[in-house]
Amino acid sequence: MENHILVVFPHPDDESFGTSGTLARRIREGAKVTYACLTLGEMARNMGKPLVANRVTLPEHRRKELEASCRSIGIQDLRLMGLHDKTIEFEDQDLLDGMLRKLIDEVKPSLIITFYPGFSVHPDHDATGEAVIRTVAAMPKEQRPVVNCVAFAKGCEQIIGKPDVAVDVRDFLPNKFGSIRAHASQFRWKEILGSYTEEDEQIKSRFSTERFWTYRFE
């Protein structure tokens, strides 16, 4: 079982739908989680409906939402890495990889969770995954942590195969739903639920499994 998990995503809310239940479960099982969020998602189009922020106040608002999400999941260590939203692909690779290597050397994770490069829709997602893969690939083989990736691009399974890790998070849906609700500027939870409630089996079934691809290094 993992003793320390490092999560590397570019935006607040990236943790909610695909990993929050898994993280809550692993924390209950005794793991420590460090979440490195590269940006504050300050260029997001959504600012709440009705509006809860403007372009100036959105970064701070999203920081507070992220902190609330982490509390719901139980994440013990949140790192705000200070990069700018929608620019990860343009960052100096040596500086970005160096930042990640320093963090890996500090927390010594047995598992890293990030996006699968090329199969995660958003340029920031893909660039983040690429940086994690580059950084881990440059480490001595015996020191590399396992890297589990989130992918959701259309047709990705036809290219990279089916996910090889499936985590049952049914018992941790309150944590997961709390994480999603925390990002109220980005998601309208009532619209996602539609005519259902969090207690309906259709919703529980929809959200009860989280899937990952284990990255295979050469």
Image (cartoon, rainbow, N blue to C red):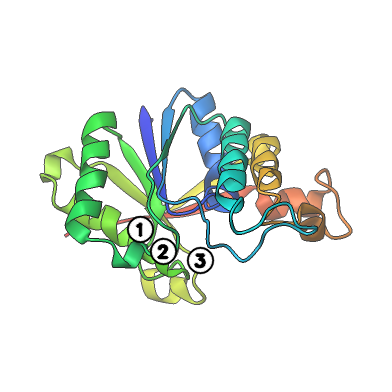
Read off the residue under disc 1.
128
Residue 101, by quadrant, is: top left
Q: CA distance from mark 3 to mark 1?
A: 15 Å
Q: Which mark is residue 152?
A: 3
Question: Residue 163 at what x, y percent from top left?
Answer: 44, 59
Please name whichever residue, 63 or 129, is drawn nearer the observer in this view of the structure.
63
The residue pinned by badge 2 equals: 124
Q: Looking at the image, how many numbered discs can be counted on the residues?
A: 3
Neighbours of disc 1 within 10 Å: few (<14), some (14-19), many (20+): many
In the figure, is residue 193 to the left or right of 211? Answer: right
Q: Amino acid at mark 3?
A: Phe
* Furthest residue toward top: 30
The alpha-carbon separation of the residues under discs 2 and 1 comes to: 6 Å
Quarter of the image containing the C terminus? bottom left
Asked whether disc 2 touches disc 1, contact meaning CB atoms under 8 Å apart, the reply is yes
Q: Earlier in the sequence, mark 2 or mark 3?
A: 2
Q: What percent of the width, then of the height, locates residue 71?
A: 60, 30
